[in-house]
Image (tube, rainbow, N blue to C red):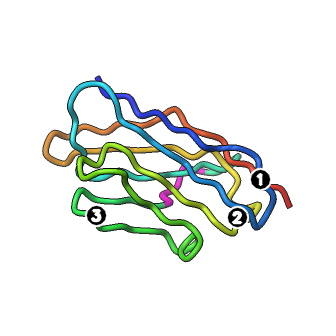
Amino acid sequence: QVQLVESGGGLVQAGGSLTLSCAASGRIFIPNTMGWYRQAPGKQRELVATISSSGRTNTVDSVKGRFTISRRDVANRTVYLHMNSLKPEDTGVYYCNANSVSTGENYWGQGTQVTVSS
């Protein structure tokens, strides 16, 4: 079994910064892609950013230039989401995801709350 554990959420004023962390633990699992999604109250979960095993990143337009995804090591088992210039509309529960195309595995973390006050 693989577990994804997120940390780093909290309450911050608009314009502030937070860094989220996600660490994979459990049995050996090398994901092809890890990423961050978020879900605002009353809305569907949406993609924020992903990073592939090769280091290629993808960031959605709404956070581009403000959020950066990075990883700790080449095994790609720890990823970070550096969030700057936060806006109230960034408020939501942020979920970490890890998946492997070769094995078809897909895992989610439990989510961490980010609240941006105006």
* Disc 2, SS: loop
Q: Is 46 included in the stretch rendered in magenta? A: yes
Disc 3 versus disc 1: distance between alpha carbons?
29 Å
Marks 2/1 in contact by CB < 8 Å: the verdict is yes
> Mark 3 vs mark 2: which is more N-terminal?
3
Above/below status of 107 relative to 86: above
How would you rate the neighbour count of disc 2 (Cα within 10 Å): few for under 14, some for 14-19, many for 20 or more? many
Left or right placement of residue 114 versus residue 31 in this view: right
First to last magenta residue range: 44-48
The answer to whether marks 3 and 1 mark residues whose Cβ atoms lie closer than 8 Å is: no
Give residue 75's position: percent from left, percent from top. 24, 47
Q: Residues within 10 Å of mark 3 (few under 14, many from 20)?
A: some
Residue 96 shown left or right of residue 116 in the figure: left
Alpha-carbon distance for marks 2 and 1? 8 Å
Give the mark, 2 or 1, whose residue is nearer the N terminus.
1
- Residue shown at the point (52%, 55%) measured from the top left: 46
Residue for badge 2 = 86
Occupied quadrant, residue 29: top left
Per the picture, the main secondary structure of the magenta-coloured stretch is strand
Residue type (three-letter) at the residue carrying disc 1: Val
- The quarter of the image holding the C terminus is bottom right
Mark 3: amino acid: Gly
Circle 3 sits on which residue?
55
The part of the image, by quadrant, that contains residue 13 is bottom right
- The residue singled out by tag 1 in the image is 12
Q: Residue furthest right?
A: 118
* Residue farthest toward the front in the current orientation of the protein: 73
